[in-house]
């Protein structure tokens, strides 16, 4: 079965065939704040399907698609790839998954990302996890990451930090203004960070009961 993440049809909009939209949680935080690491734990404990926007873009480069070279050069410059490309990859991945609970990490990274996702899928996030971490700590973590990523070099890291401050933080602030952000102190050991993450998910589950 495919998961319905398309824009609402008129039939659905008038209520005759309303299907429940999937639950989406956005996981945000600067480069190296620990998004991917914590998502792996959340998947294990809470049954979500995890998609990293960055991983989907890197897979697209590897696949040799016609957009690959453009994506590669943007990532190597620390820039944000046009939303059209990223939203299409996310939507496809969600549809193919068959699940209806998603953690989307590293997205939305700017306001254009946010608006495009909403327009294409009709989905608003249930909430946003924001991993708050000082730049020096994020830099240390990335330089020790060893994932052989072309963008994990000091020059590109500095560009990514700048883009994070200028384009991504405003998205976090937007979600804060509508009361959707759970801010986590990410500058602690992995297990301690996860205790705080777990508390967020547990309290949400209790509210739903
Ligand atoms: N709380 C933490 N303390 C120390 N190192 C961490 C912590 N969380 C993640 N790391 C390490 O830091 C690096 C970046 O983590 P990652 O999950 O890839 O971050 P992001 O997806 O936000 O860029 C990885 O090598 C990871 O093992
Ligand atoms: N929504 C997104 C997410 C990532 N990208 C690009 C630009 C980012 O610098 C790279 C890497 O993103 P990724 O989330 O994998 O990086 P970190 O895990 O935060 O270190 O991918 C994008 O263009 N748009
Ligand atoms: Mg990551």
Image (spheres, rainbow, N blue to C red):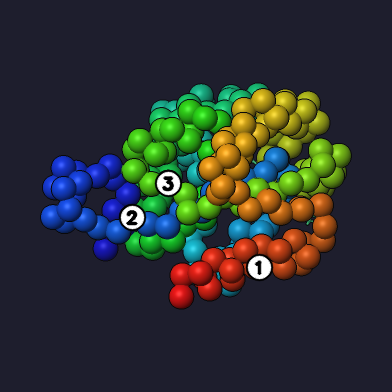
Toward which corner of the image does residue 161 lie, by quadrant?
top right
Residue on which the image places disc 1: 199
Task: Name the residue at 61% across, 39% down.
Answer: 172
Query: How crowded is the residue under tag 2: few (<14 C-alpha within 10 Å), some, or many (20+)?
Result: some
Q: Quadrant of the N terminus?
A: bottom left
Circle number at residue 21 = 2
Q: Is residue 107 left or right of residue 17?
A: right
Is there any visible trace of residue 105 in the rendered image? no
Secondary structure under the numbered disc 1 in the rendered image:
helix
**94 in relation to 136, above or below:** below
Image location of residue 21, percent across then percent down: 33, 55
**77 in relation to 197, above or below:** above
Task: Name the residue at 74% across, 46% down.
Answer: 132
Image location of residue 23, percent across then percent down: 42, 57
**Who comes first in sequence, dot 3 or dot 2?**
2
Residue on which the image places disc 3: 124
Secondary structure under the numbered disc 2 in the rendered image:
loop
Q: Is residue 24 left or right of residue 40?
A: left
Q: Label 2, label 1: how many angstroms apart (C-alpha)?
A: 25 Å
Figure quarter occupied by ligand 2: top right
Q: Label 3, label 2: how many angstroms apart (C-alpha)?
A: 9 Å
**166 in relation to 105, above or below:** above
Front residue of this view, candidates 195 and 155: 195
């Amino acid at each position: 079965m495919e998961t319905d993440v398309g824009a609402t049809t008129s039939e659905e909009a008038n209520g005759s065939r309303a299907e429940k939209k999937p639950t989406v949680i956005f996981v945000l935080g600067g480069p190296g704040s620990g998004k991917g690491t914590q998502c792996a734990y959340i998947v294990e404990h809470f049954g979500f399907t995890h998609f990293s926007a960055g991983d989907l873009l890197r897979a697209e480069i590897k696949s040799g698609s016609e957009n690959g070279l453009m994506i590669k050069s943007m990532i190597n410059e620390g820039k944000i790839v046009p939303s059209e490309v990223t939203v299409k990859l996310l939507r496809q991945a969600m549809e193919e998954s068959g699940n209806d609970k998603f953690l989307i990490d590293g997205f939305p990274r700017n306001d254009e990302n946010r608006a495009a996702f909403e327009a294409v899928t009709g989905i608003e996030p249930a909430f946003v996890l924001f991993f708050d971490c000082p730049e020096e700590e994020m830099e240390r973590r990335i330089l020790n990451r060893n994932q052989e990523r072309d963008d994990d070099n000091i020059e590109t890291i500095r560009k990514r930090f700048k883009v994070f401050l200028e384009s991504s933080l405003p998205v976090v602030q937007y979600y804060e203004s509508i009361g959707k952000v759970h801010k986590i102190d990410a500058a602690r050991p992995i297990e301690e960070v996860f205790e705080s993450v777990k508390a967020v998910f547990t309290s949400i589950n209790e509210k739903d009961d």
